[in-house]
Amino acid sequence: YSYPVTLTPLSNSDYATTFRSVIVSGNTQKEFTLDSIHLLSGVVRGPNSTPMINVAIRLDRGASRGVDSAITDVNGRYSFNVSSGGYSLAFEGRDNTNFPVSSSWYLDKYASVVVNADTVRNVDIPLVTLSGQTTDSNGVAVGNISVALDGLWFSGGNQRSLRNTVTSDASGNYSMYVLAPDSPYTYSIEITPPQESGFTQFPVNFKILVNT
């Protein structure tokens, strides 16, 4: 049987958490060599290559190697101390980023990287703008309308999702950030007027490809 082994040095060590295995069939002596630390870092960017703050990042080290997490700083930067190997990165944003959504967006295993030395991996989040106007059937602007968008799809078996709600202004204008899928995808949108408006709630399906 092959036992997984995790070697965890002190936090101020020059060595990285190291993952090994050992086969034990009787009394066994095994020497383990610790991996050196490499710095994996980069900048998470949104529309117009603007650095994104407060984006949550999950670093997946692969089977039996665990995960780590970080939050981008005011310059959109993130960093992890890692050993040599292959990694995947997942990203999540909420209402506390500089490109806020009311609920959240999520990109599972959106970026991958192989680390053999200090490595920079910048990532562009495919946020685009959906904007327009809420009107009645005669084209007259109607304000204070809730526009709620919801989407869940998979790319290469990895989850992509977004939920966002905005309210149109007094002139009926609205604008929201959405994820641009890497292949055609139809979002569900629900339009909800105020109860006293006399209008009814109704769903809309909308395909997002680029800034719309």
Image (cartoon, rainbow, N blue to C red):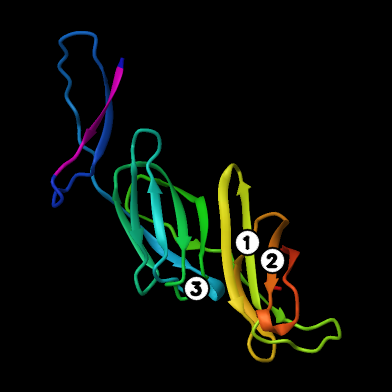
Circles 1 and 3, Cβ within 8 Å, touching? The answer is: no
The earlier-in-sequence mark between 2 and 1 is 1
Camera-nearest label, 3 or 2: 2
The earlier-in-sequence mark between 3 and 2 is 3
Circles 2 and 1, Cβ within 8 Å, touching? The answer is: yes
**Residue beneath the point at 32% across and 59% down:** 79
- The one of 145 and 115 positioned closer to us in this rendering: 145
Residue neighbourhood size for the residue with mark 2, other residues' Cα within 10 Å, grouped as few (<14), some (14–19), many (≥20): many
Which corner quadrant of the image does residue 132 belong to? bottom right
* Circle 2 residue: 189
Helix, strand, or loop for circle 3? loop
Q: Main secondary structure of the magenta part?
A: strand
Whether 182 is drawn above or below 48: the answer is above
* Circle 3 residue: 100
Task: Report the quarter where the N terminus lies.
Answer: top left
Which corner quadrant of the image does residue 131 belong to? bottom right
Instruction: List x then y, in percent, for residue 27.
Output: 15, 10
Instruction: List x then y, in percent, for residue 82.
Output: 30, 47
Q: Is residue 210 visible?
A: no
The span picked out in magenta is 2-9
Q: CA distance from mark 1 to mark 3?
A: 15 Å
* Circle 1 residue: 150
- The one of 58 and 150 positioned closer to us in this rendering: 150
Helix, strand, or loop for circle 1? strand
Q: Amino acid at mark 3?
A: Pro
Is 3 magenta? The answer is yes
**Residue beneath the point at 50% across and 73% down:** 100
Helix, strand, or loop for circle 2? strand
Residue 80 lies left or right of residue 113; in this view the side is left
The earlier-in-sequence mark between 1 and 3 is 3
